[in-house]
């Protein structure tokens, strides 16, 4: 579609095409292997236009994460009764990783964040504002932020072992069994009794 | 020490020097940024000697992991009563990550495994033979392998959040509080009641 190409900053479809090309490149080649030039070529635009929209490779990566991460679908799973919040989150999280529309992007983002400090900072910002924020607001306990991070750490590690490292037999255990196994651990972090600050006793 | 250099495959100190240089390079530049040539230069030997000892970059990485991972210190923490195994493991694991002698290497290995399939395979082999094996043999429950991996997934994710991504307030929470918070989750995986196989009910 030639009319979609060229230097027209006002065209939202051009921006969309750049983002799509960027996501594909980050998934296929990682953060380190992605260049503004290659993304511009794949999107059929001038590199200067990519810079115009996104400012830098970091800006492009941030926009690509934001565009491709299924944040809304995770946030949906937060809503509902607090007593079953972990069941909903674990099931939704695993189903997103299993989904061919989301799994490869999630993997690319996790790998980029593990390998590249700039990518890690971008993922942290997105997690904090888009995901941990809504989750924390739904928790009635003290230390909501630390609780949320303990649960998130488990979920990230689960994805590392199951989808990135693909360690068996964890990788081939049915997702609903894995979700059922981890949900109580997550529920305890989110709503259970924890000692998360120093007290006279804990020192 | 000129007498340590040169092509003398039989000299264990030469091999040691190559390994030290390799570990330093993997920590500083990652798996992707490490080359046989640069390691050889840093160790003061010919690249052919590195190939002679380790066969390939993967072989060098495998040897470096094996040399530098504090496997024995983790295995020590397995020994003891099963009822407190998670307390011991969580405390030891966090203290190793906190230790300047081990933390940077653990981080380099985790980052390499996240970013590079070849490095992931090497880490998986090492985990399976050196760490999960001894842990599994100390568990009396069914599904020892899957239980061990669920616990390991949590520990890996905790390291990702706390030491690689450095997400606050988790990163600055005292290690003993974090260990106390996660130990019950790990203990449940290792010795608690879990449904880890399909039954007529769980389908």
Image: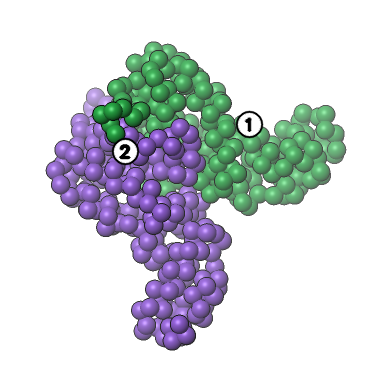
Chain colours: A purple, B green
Q: Toward which corner of the image does residue A66 lie, by quadrant?
A: bottom left
Q: Secondary structure at mark 2?
A: helix
Up/down of B196 relative to A131, above or below: above
Q: Which disc number belongs to residue A114? A: none
Q: CA distance from mark 2 to mark 1?
A: 38 Å
Q: Which disc number belongs to residue A176? A: 2
Question: What residue does disc 1 label?
Answer: B67
Q: Residue A17: percent from the left, percent from the top? A: 43, 74
Closer to the camera in the image, B56 or A114: B56
Q: Toward which corner of the image does residue B40 lie, by quadrant?
A: top right
Q: Residue A142: percent from the left, percent from the top? A: 18, 40
Can residue A185 be spotted in the picture?
Answer: no
Residue that protrudes farthest toward the top in the picture: B81
Q: Residue A108: percent from the left, percent from the top? A: 46, 54
Query: How packed is label 1: few (under 14 Cα within 10 Å), some, or many (20 or more)?
Result: some
Up/down of B141 relative to B158, above or below: above
Up/down of A132 relative to A193, above or below: below
Give the residue displayed 33% in from the left and 54% down from the top.
A127
For the N terminus of chain B, give its image quadrant: top right
- The tally of labels here is 2
């Amino acid at each position: 579609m030639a009319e979609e190409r060229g230097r027209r900053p006002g065209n939202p479809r051009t921006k969309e095409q750049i983002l799509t090309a960027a996501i594909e490149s980050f998934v296929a080649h990682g953060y380190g292997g992605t260049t503004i030039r290659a993304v511009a070529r794949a999107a059929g635009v001038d590199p200067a236009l990519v810079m115009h929209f996104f400012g830098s490779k970091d800006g492009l990566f941030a926009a690509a994460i934001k565009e491709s991460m299924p944040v809304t679908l995770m946030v949906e799973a937060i809503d509902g009764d607090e007593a079953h919040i972990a069941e909903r989150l674990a099931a939704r999280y695993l189903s997103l990783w299993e989904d061919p529309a989301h799994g490869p992007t999630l993997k690319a983002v996790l790998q980029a964040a593990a390998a590249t400090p700039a990518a890690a900072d971008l993922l942290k910002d997105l997690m904090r504002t888009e995901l941990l924020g809504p989750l924390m607001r739904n928790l009635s306990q003290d230390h909501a932020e630390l609780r949320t991070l303990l649960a998130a750490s488990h979920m990230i590690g689960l994805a590392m072992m199951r989808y990135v490292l693909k360690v068996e037999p964890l990788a081939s255990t049915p997702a609903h069994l894995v979700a059922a196994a981890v949900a109580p651990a997550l529920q305890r972090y989110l709503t259970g009794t924890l000692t998360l600050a120093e007290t006279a006793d804990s020192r």
